[in-house]
Amino acid sequence: MPVLAFSSPKGGVGKTTLTANVAVALHQLGWGVLVIDFDVQNSLRLHFGMALDDERGYVAFADEPEEWPNLAMPTNSGVFFLPYGQVTEEQRLRFERHLTDEPDYLMRGLGSILERPDWVVLADLPPGPVPALRGLDRIGATHVAVLLADATSLSLLPLIERGHFYGARRPLVVLNQVDPRRQLSRSVTDFVSGRIPDHLIGEIYRDEAVAEAIGWQRSVFEQAPASVGARDIKHLAEVLSSRLKQEARNSAPLPPAIEAHR
Ligand SMILES: Nc1ncnc2c1ncn2[C@@H]1O[C@H](COP(=O)(O)OP(=O)(O)O)[C@@H](O)[C@H]1O
Ligand SMILES: [Mg+2]
């Protein structure tokens, strides 16, 4: 059941940017990809060329999650996209109540896609311990925590390790906007890779090409395929892809006759 949830205790760290670009890279690696925006800010659409006055989205259909797959939009990159949409405060709260109160809510909405072993769902979350984090946890999402290579992010690492934000299941961690020319950035990166070597799965260079691609409403792979940012994000997608394949192998049931003798 491949779901990747990009989240962070902090805002402005690159969750949305990485969700969008990793989605495109995973598609280029052969996965069917659906990206979902869980943030009322609605900024994931900026990466997929959606017009700013287009108000469509799935949160307005909070009471009918079975409808969501029909609302997914094709994009130029080949990734399918489910926008949050423009909603009223009442609609947002209604959606969050469903997420909090109904354990099978996201499964009702996404079950048909999650059954497909060759598809992956990527979720872009708002910062902090939001209801979507719990909802995605319940459907077995792999959490990808995005942090910056700075002192504030470093101060949050012990909280994550103690089970704040993510509960007992430790997230995979990506350090974004790493700048090896800066001493602090190097020190933080070295410290984190020494502290959680098995969980740190990516270091993404601070690269203007990554930021500029959003201005053109496209991925860094279309904007600047030879850039360092594109290289790092492609590598992150490869790491995630092989982890997803490994998980699928581990979770695929063996025939009962073989299982009985293991
Ligand atoms: N690797 C990077 N290099 C340069 N700029 C980046 C990088 N990642 C993100 N940014 C920029 O950082 C800002 C915040 O990114 P965003 O994805 O909106 O963060 P979040 O979703 O965590 O709030 C944006 O202006 C984005 O262009
Ligand atoms: Mg965001």
Image (spheres, grey):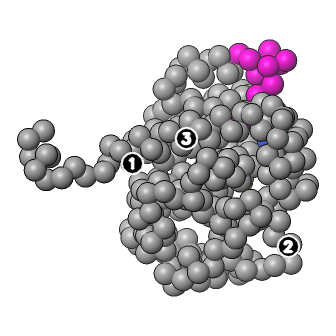
Instruction: Look at label 2 and name its amino acid.
Output: Ala
Q: Quadrant of residue 89?
A: bottom right
Q: Is residue 237 above or below residue 102?
A: above
Left or right relative to 100: residue 253: left
Q: Which mark is residue 51?
A: 2
Instruction: Look at label 3 and name its amino acid.
Output: Leu
Q: State how far apart marks 2 and 3 are (Cα).
A: 30 Å
Residue 236 coordinates in the image, percent (x, y): 63, 37
Mark 2: secondary structure = loop
Q: Is residue 234 above or below residue 103?
A: above
Q: Which mark is residue 248?
A: 1
Identify the residue at horizontal 79%, vertical 19% (top origin). 180
Residue 177 coordinates in the image, percent (x, y): 77, 33
Identify the residue at horizontal 64%, vertical 53% (top origin). 27
Q: Nearer the viewer, residue 226 or 5?
A: 226
Mark 2 or 3, closer to the camera: 3
Residue 109 coordinates in the image, percent (x, y): 49, 74
Q: Nearer the viewer, residue 226 or 49?
A: 226
Q: State how far apart marks 1 and 3 are (Cα).
A: 12 Å
Mark 3: secondary structure = helix
In primary-sequence order, the first of circles 1 and 2 is 2
Identify the residue at horizontal 51%, vertical 79% (top origin). 65
Q: Which mark is residue 240?
A: 3
Quadrant where the N terminus sits is: bottom left
Residue 39 visible at all: no
Q: Is residue 159 above or below residue 258?
A: above
Mark 1 or 2, closer to the camera: 1
Pointer 3 local density, CA inside 10 Å: few below 14, some 14–19, many at least 20: many
- What segment carries the magenta color? 176-187
Instruction: Look at label 1 and name its amino acid.
Output: Ala
Quadrant where the C terminus sits is: top left
Mark 1: secondary structure = helix
